[in-house]
Amino acid sequence: MSSSTFRLDGRTALVTGAGSGIGRSTAIELAAAGATVGCADIDQRSCVACVEEIERHGGTAFAYELDVRSRAAFAAVVANLASRTGQVDVLANVAGAVAARGPLVSISEEEFDDGVALNLKSFVHGCSAVAEYMVRIGGGSIINVSSGTVDGRAPNLGAYSIPKAGVLQLTRTLAMELGGDGIRVNSVSPGYILTALTAAHYRNEDGEMDAGLERQIVDTQRAQIPLGRAGHAGEVAAAIRFLASDAASYITGQVLRVNGGLAMPL
């Protein structure tokens, strides 16, 4: 298999959550592989910064302010990107966040609904929006980012982990439904990755960073991870690039765990 198999030259990719963390690293990684990248995030300023970073390295990218919870807004971004480039070949559904913390039975209906909207329904919106364009060009690759919480215990994170588990079933369902159209649908499940999302675990009840809590969590994670360290956003982005490329041309409906060995389901 030649290195060109991992290239994305001439392709257009849309990355949600491109303003920070795994999303930003993914946008930069796909652009480095030759793709034109639509960088979408609810934070327009961070999106523009990501585009500027890509352009500084000779890539092509466009910034989109996007609330992924809106089906209409998602469809409009996809339509605009397709009109600019003529196609949409790759979707990296990365955007997501912990909407509420606490025992599941104590979380309000509104908090749980927000978690589902942000971490599951938004993925449905994105897949639905790109599918018609991918069918038109004869195929494509969708990568849905789930979470390592689906393989372990996640107390007080039910509004996040339950929708993320749904992302895996969404991936399997669409892999079956869209495979005949040449569309591959896979999921990446990150383990303990150093991002702003994981940094939220280090805050105490008043929102301030707690250095002692950070050391405790990091040391606990390191002790449980066979590779002995936390992961980095770029390592998840590399997995997404692989699944987007022709190197993964016969892979669909699968979960790629980027977790240092933290979970090893058979």
Image (cartoon, helix red, strand yellow):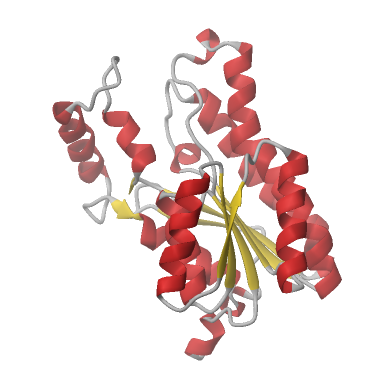
Residue 58 in the figure: left or right of residue 192: right
Q: Where is residue 89 in the image (x, y as percent from the top left)?
A: 69, 69
Q: Where is residue 67 in the image (x, y as percent from the top left)?
A: 63, 39
- The residue at the point 30 percent across, 36 percent down is 199
Residue nearest the observer in this picture, 70 or 175: 70
Is residue 12 something one can see in this rendering?
Answer: yes
- The residue at the point 71 percent across, 53 percent down is 77
Residue nearest the observer in this picture, 39 or 96: 39
The part of the image, by quadrant, that contains residue 9 is bottom right
Task: Tell me: residue 225, above or below residue 252.
Answer: above
Residue nearest the observer in this picture, 93 or 185: 93
- The residue at the point 31 percent across, 54 percent down is 231
Q: Which residue lies furthest to the top in this view?
A: 106
Residue 2 in the figure: left or right of residue 133: left
Q: Where is residue 210 in the image (x, y as percent from the top left)?
A: 19, 26
The part of the image, by quadrant, that contains residue 218 is top left
Residue 104 in the figure: left or right of residue 38: left
Q: Which residue lies furthest to the bottom in this view?
A: 2
Residue 129 in the figure: left or right of residue 244: right
Task: Tell me: residue 194, above or below residue 186.
Answer: above
Task: Tell me: residue 162, above or below residue 227.
Answer: above
Label count reads 0
Residue nearest the observer in this picture, 208 or 200: 208
Q: Where is residue 133 in the image (x, y as percent from the top left)?
A: 81, 64
- The residue at the point 34 percent across, 31 percent down is 200
Task: Tell me: residue 246, above or below residue 44.
Answer: below
Is residue 266 something one can see in this rendering?
Answer: no
